[in-house]
Amino acid sequence: MSSERPKAIPTVQLKNDRVVVTEWRFAPGAETGWHRHGYDYVVVPQTTGKLLLETADGNIEADLTTGVAYYRGEGVEHNVINANDYEFVFVETEIL
């Protein structure tokens, strides 16, 4: 975890009693900060590239492709970092 990294910018696009849809924008090197997901969620990348996931078990590099969604279950803990030299964007839908 580094306080020197810029922070990713979340913008909630939709929130109701069933879902929260958030667009995340990451400048090069930006991070979310450590967090734990309280709900199942689906991510749809809007950019193709690499994200670095810092986890309690070590770092994982994820190759993501524009438009190719993935699912994760509640309880995931990590810090997500843009490992590209360009802006990276994804849309996250939390299932409440």
Image (cartoon, rainbow, N blue to C red):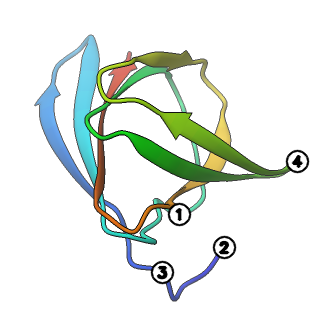
Disc 2 to disc 3: CB gap under 8 Å? no
The tag earlier along the polypeptide, 4 or 1, is 1
Q: Earlier in the sequence, mark 3 or mark 4?
A: 3
Between 36 and 56, the one nearer to me in the picture: 56
Q: Provide the residue designation for mark 1.
A: 33
Please tell me whether mark 4 sits on a helix, a strand or a loop.
loop
Give the label on residue 18, or none.
Answer: none
The image quadrant where one finds the N terminus is bottom right
Give the SS element for disc 2.
loop
Q: Which residue is mark 4?
A: 57
Give the structural element (helix, strand or loop) at label 3.
loop
* 76 over 74 or under it: above or below: below
Q: Give the mark, 1 or 3, whose residue is nearer the N terminus.
A: 3
Find residue 19 and report its horizontal and vertical position in percent. 27, 17
Residue type for callout 4 = Asp
Tag 1 near tag 3, CB within 8 Å: no
Residue annotated with mark 2: 1
Rendered location of residue 57, percent (x, y): 88, 47
Left or right: where does residue 85 sit relative to residue 91?
Answer: right
Residue occupied by mark 3: 5
Q: CA distance from mark 4 to mark 1?
A: 16 Å
Instruction: Kindly give the residue lying farthest to the top in the view shown.
Output: 18
**Residue in the picture at 53% in, 63% down:** 33
* Cα separation between marks 4 and 2: 14 Å
Q: Is residue 21 left or right of residue 1?
A: left
Report the Cα–Cα distance between label 1 and label 3: 9 Å
In this orientation, which residue lies closer to the viewer: 12 or 18? Answer: 12
- Residue 71 vs 76, above or below: the answer is above
